[in-house]
Image: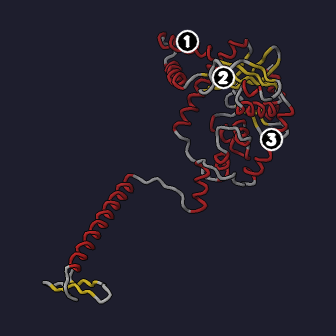
Amino acid sequence: MIDTYLESLGQRFQRHADRAAWLAFRAAKHRVGGTDATTLAGVGYEPLWSLWERHHGPTPATSNNKAELFAEGHLWEPVILDLYAEHTGSEVRGMDGTTIADADDPWAYASLDALACDRGEVGAVDGKTNRKIDSRDMQNAIIAQWNDTAALCIPEVYAVQGYHYLDCTGLPWIDFAILCAPAWWLGPSSRVLRIGERHPDDPFVQAEVAAVRREAGKRLRIVRIMRDDGTQAALRGTVRDLRQHHIIDGEPPEIDHSDACRRHVGRLTGEGVQRATDDQDIAARRLRSERRMAAASATTAKRLRNDLAGSMTGRKLVGDGWSITKSANGRITLKGL
């Protein structure tokens, strides 16, 4: 069934040679994937300014924190998909490094984690790690149509991404397999998985990996979103308009407090902030010290001058190589001092 579905897509389905080719596909022709759709819809984790900057400004380096989170999610993905297959009994096929372009809007595409065949019907699967959702609150559910109660089952950012994928692929449903766990559990457990990849023949290591997988299975929640043509059409219209406005036409978003916005304003005003090097910081500290000493010396000199002038009983006071003259209006002139 999965092969039949992929064959029906024709050239809309592409399997990229490596990650570099996959990234190049995403960056070309102002394409919009699931994550970009959530940003344009205003519910994504990434600010709209960051998306705009990628297309119309210098692209900042990914922070170490974001890189670590991406690596962690990438490491957990095959485990989550395996657990999903065990929980559902479905045939699951990983789709890493592939894309499916929309039939009507070629700029829109889906990059799925996996496809699944459930009782003869093919759908999509997306694996997530979520540190904010409590696994006790998150319940398995089927969302037939988006409404207020649906938001209690799954975050809006997942829903928008899911509807975008359903619109691009034409599939009838998408399952979100969500591993709900706190950061302290996901992080150390990720290290166990990484060690397990390096030592697949070590019985002790593999026993630790198996224990992590068993615990992950208890924390897994599956939420299915069914195809909703009305919601998908409304979402696509919003994404299409904002893509044209901000990505194609290059209109900057409204000013906010995001880092990308601050960088843009800095470039416009010529007042961009540059972090000082260690040498520049030391030089600035010395300058500040010298200015303080100079200010203190000037204050002392002024006090001494006033003391001398105050002790004068006449118009002029002279000494060995110096003199102080006081005018009728009180102005003091120093010579030799």
User: Relative to 129, does residue 233 appear above or below in the rendering?
Assistant: below
284 on left or right of 59: left
Residue topped by disc 1: 210
Quarter of the C terminus within the rendering: bottom left
How is the rendered protein coloured?
A: secondary structure
Q: Percent x, y for residue 312?
A: 20, 83
- Locate residue 276: give its quadrant: bottom left
Q: Which of the two discs, 1 and 3, labels the residue nearer the N terminus?
A: 3
Disc ID at residue 178 = 2
Q: Secondary structure at mark 3?
A: loop
Name the residue furthest front: 313
Residue topped by disc 3: 106
Check if mark 1's residue and mark 3's residue have beta carbons within 8 Å.
no
Q: Which of the two discs, 1 and 2, labels the residue nearer the N terminus?
A: 2
- Kind of residue at badge 2: Ile
User: Relative to 193, does residue 242 appear above or below in the rendering?
Assistant: below
Q: Percent x, y for residue 101?
A: 78, 36
Q: Percent x, y for residue 301?
A: 25, 72
- Kind of residue at badge 1: Ala
